Amino acid sequence: MTRKIAIIGGKGGVGKTMLTSNLAYALTELGEDVIAIDANMTTPNLGMHVGMHLASKTLHDVLKGETKLERALYHHPFGFKFIPASISVNALTGVDAGKLSNVTFNLTGKADYILVDCAAGLGREAISAIDAVDEILLITNPDLPSVADALKTASIAKRMRKSIIGVVVNRRKREEHELSLKGIKDILELPIISQIPEDKLVSESIAAKQPIIEYAPDSDAAIEINRLAHKMTGRKFRHKKPVNMRILDWLVGWMSG
Ligand SMILES: Nc1ncnc2c1ncn2[C@@H]1O[C@H](COP(=O)(O)OP(=O)(O)O)[C@@H](O)[C@H]1O
Ligand SMILES: [Mg+2]
């Protein structure tokens, strides 16, 4: 069975693309067959996150009917398959985002997971992405604007009869002004299935064009993403940090009281 999942949140910059690239890799590491699609057609970034932004055939060509789907399906060195979007402004002319569901339909049976990285907002691009999948992974940051946008997204996804796997709260700094997990859960009325901390290493990993789980596998963000991948596949998760990192964590906790 192919699980088709959109990673979506409404607001820009909440971590949709970061989560898509990392989940693609984390699920691959668990032995799953994964296809990641950059469905952010106007401002695509997934290719940049995984170091494949200069592909010659793209989702845009497929949606315009100018290229066969197989020709835009690339094998990433990390083991997953990837359909990039074009970074050229000219490529947008004549693209029908609504045809994305044909793409995911034609890929059904060809992978265990199809992960769709969505555009921000709730315009045609994002709606087409929701339409092209069966399940939604909702991502937000712990602030009211992000949660408000996530709420709208969830409401539309429900109206479109999509199943919402749960909420990923990304960039948690545990600062006083942040919305609490309980607050977010109460607003969205959905289970929070993952909380990923704010981690400078995430930005570093993106600059290095590597998923954080490869770049810094013992970082807290990487551990949380791995935990999420295990949860999504129904596997048990147990991560043992190296001794020196456990001592460092203990010291930091002790110093911050
Ligand atoms: N957990 C995190 N810790 C620190 N920075 C993060 C984290 N998640 C995302 N970021 C930063 O936020 C930026 C936006 O993330 P991105 O995945 O591109 O968001 P979106 O796809 O939702 O617009 C990234 O460039 C990255 O630097
Ligand atoms: Mg993005």
Image: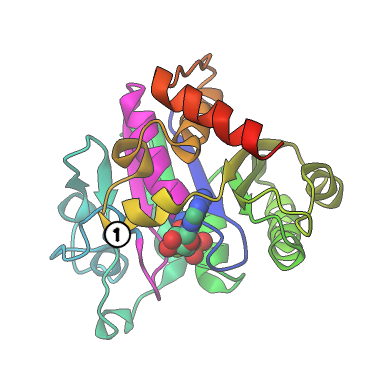
Q: Position of residue 144 (x, y in %)?
A: 77, 64
Q: Seen in the image, is 117 located left or right of residue 174? A: left
**56 or 253: nearer the eye?**
253
Please indicate, yes or no, whether residue 214 appears anywhere in the rendered image: yes
Q: Seen in the image, is 229 located left or right of residue 88? A: right
Residue range (magenta): 18-45
Mark 1 residue type: Ala
Find numbered disc 1 in the image and state the secondary structure of the residue it sits on. helix
Q: Callout 1 environment at 10 Å: few (<14), some (14 to 19), or many (20+)? A: some
| Rendering quadrant holding ligand 2 | bottom left
**83 or 98: nearer the eye?**
83
Q: Quadrant of residue 41?
A: bottom left
**232 or 243: nearer the eye?**
243
Q: In which quarter of the image is residue 155?
A: bottom right
Q: Where is residue 68 in the image (x, y as percent from the top left)?
A: 19, 57
The residue that label 1 is drawn on is: 207
Which quadrant holds the N terminus? top left
Residue at 39% across, 42% down? 22
